[in-house]
Amino acid sequence: MKISKTQFINNIKFSNSLAPEEIYRDSIEQSAFSNELKLEDLMQIENRYKVESLIENVYEEESDETLDEKIDLQLEMMMPYYKELEILSGRAIKDRFGGNVIYDLDTFKQKRFSYLHEEVELFCFLDGYQEDEEMIRVFETKATTSNKFSFEKYNFKLNDEKHPMFTKLSSGEFVPTENVMENLPDDYYKKEAKLLDLSDSLGKYIYDLAYQRFVYENDENKTKKNRKYYLVVLNHEYIYNGKVDQYGKNIYENDLVRFYDLTTLVAKMDQQLKNDLDKVIKMIKDNIKVNESIINKNIPERNSLYIYLDSHHGFRDENNKRLDLSDLINNGIVSALDIPRKYLNRKNNQIQREVIDSGKPYYNYNKIKDGIKQLKYPIYHLDFESFNAPLPRFRGETPYCQSVFQFSIHIETSPGKCDKDLDHYGYLAKDKRDNRRELVEKMLDIIKDDGGSILVYNISFERTRLQEFQLYFPEYKDRLENIINRLFDLLHIVKNNKKFYELLGYSKEEASEINFYHEDLQGSYSIKHVLPIFSNLSYENMPVSNGIDAMIAYNKFDQLNKKEYEKLYNDLINYCKQDTWAMVEILDALRKL
């Protein structure tokens, strides 16, 4: 039986109960073992997984949307960047290491190896394979960024000082710090254990490379040369300088990508891969098939265990033993009502449970009213739409930069005084060229220096975009700083913000509690969940109804005839307008409580 990397890893995830809420429906089909699968089928599975992974990285930071919504349109949108990354990574490998390089992100064109064990044949397809007289280097390219490897994300303590888990060599490559530093503390190896865990956000990439090594090292046809194993990722510190070639195509330097030599790290996972292979073989012999019911463990669509806020931190039983979500699910606790009340040791979870049991929403009226009192008029309700490309498009941008192409503003001059149409202002780029300056200048014309609050929903997104504008256009730094200082997050009133309410005089305990909960939220305070509770407005049936739709629509600007373009342009305006009007409606409803 032939098995691909994606099949192998997905089945290990399923068997370890790591995947119920994160595996896409397509992965069910991709994970099924079958004697009918040919090598070409495995290649198709791997190709599909590669591009879906690219989409996952596009949305993982900024979106509530699920990846199985309009997946084909998303793939079409990201494919040019995927192909460009292939070219850039291959060039960087050739320039850095020389020798003979076989590099391609298309599985059908890759170097491949296999390992036959007990009638199971594992296959690996290598993104990059480089060979010279002394060494063979294997490369696995991930469309994620080096930020996941950064000092801020992964560090260990030595003599009360923090040190990076990965160290940059003079050659420019990064290696595990144990490669260059002796007598490391226990804290280093505790952090390393996380990196070797498939469930870790970075560990999943390292496991991926470890699988490639495991298959290659057991292939009877491998050469006897020394071998190294690398992850290739986008450099999160790379800033595009705006250079283009004679055809107007962006020119990127080789330092757009970073190389992580993880040879010593993935070697430590050899025994784990052997154990996992035995587990997969047992699944096949026992005829255990992964299907949707197994993945979801009959988890209900409404009021599932996942709706509890901070549930990723687990729960505590009567003996104060930590219980992870997977522990509970494997014991048949899949509904929010299944879990014993005594396990709900967080006040916010207790509030949620009471709301579900009683069928009545919860409000902390005092906190909501005190929060609203902090607003200053006129209120500028502000929302940005952006295109999140893996490769920077314009000068000053970095990989996966949120490149703003649209904004919407509703101006509320006094409490409740705002007309949906007459008090609306906005900007939408006419094409996919660099229109950022025009956008910023238009915004600065609309938002006056009058001290009025600038209301947003989830402040980190708009604040970061404004800070980026300061870097792109330093001549407007002070005016943009004025806007940043006036930002006010409506989510602080709808949900909570501990620091905000402590400054208003609330106790630490009450400041930590949510201000509002309704069963229809289902654990999410996204504006699309909140709006229908306070208004008759809805995003349903809108041609552009979420951030993914907006990106897809913007990306099509240069592919449409005049009539199609005008319709899509207006659809985008209406969508972004809905976002800011939603804030007006929600705020007005909260005032009237």
Image: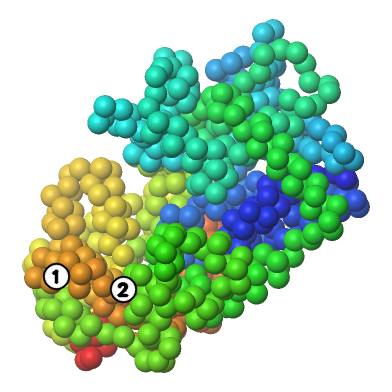
Q: Secondary structure at mark 1?
A: loop
Q: Position of residue 180 (x, y in %)?
A: 43, 17
Q: Is residue 291 rendered to the left or right of residue 306?
A: right
Residue displayed at 68% across by 47% down: 9
Mark 2 lies on a secondary structure that is helix
Residue 196 as seen in the image, left or right of residue 177: right
Q: Position of residue 218 (x, y in %)?
A: 77, 27
Taking the spot 32% from the left edge, 32% from the top edge, the residue there is 157
Give amino acid for label 2.
Answer: Lys
* Residue designated by label 1: 507
In the picture of the structure, the residue carrying the numbered disc 2 is 347
Quadrant of res 453: bottom left
**Above or below: residue 562 compared with residue 469:** below
Residue sitting at 48 percent across and 62 percent down? 323
Image marks 2 and 1: residues in contact by CB distance under 8 Å? no
Name the quadrant of the N terminus: top right
Sequence-first disc among 2 and 1: 2
Tally the marks.
Answer: 2
Quadrant assignment for the C terminus: bottom left
Callout 1 amino acid: Ser
Task: Count residues near mark 2 (Cα–Cα under 10 Å), then give few for <14, some for 14-19, many for 20+.
Answer: some
Closest to the observer, 108 or 20: 20
Furthest residue in direction top, as rendered: 133
Q: How far across and down, in percent of the image, does residue 276 sit?
A: 70, 43
| Inter-mark Cα distance, 2 to 1 | 14 Å
- Say above or below: 495 vs 137: below
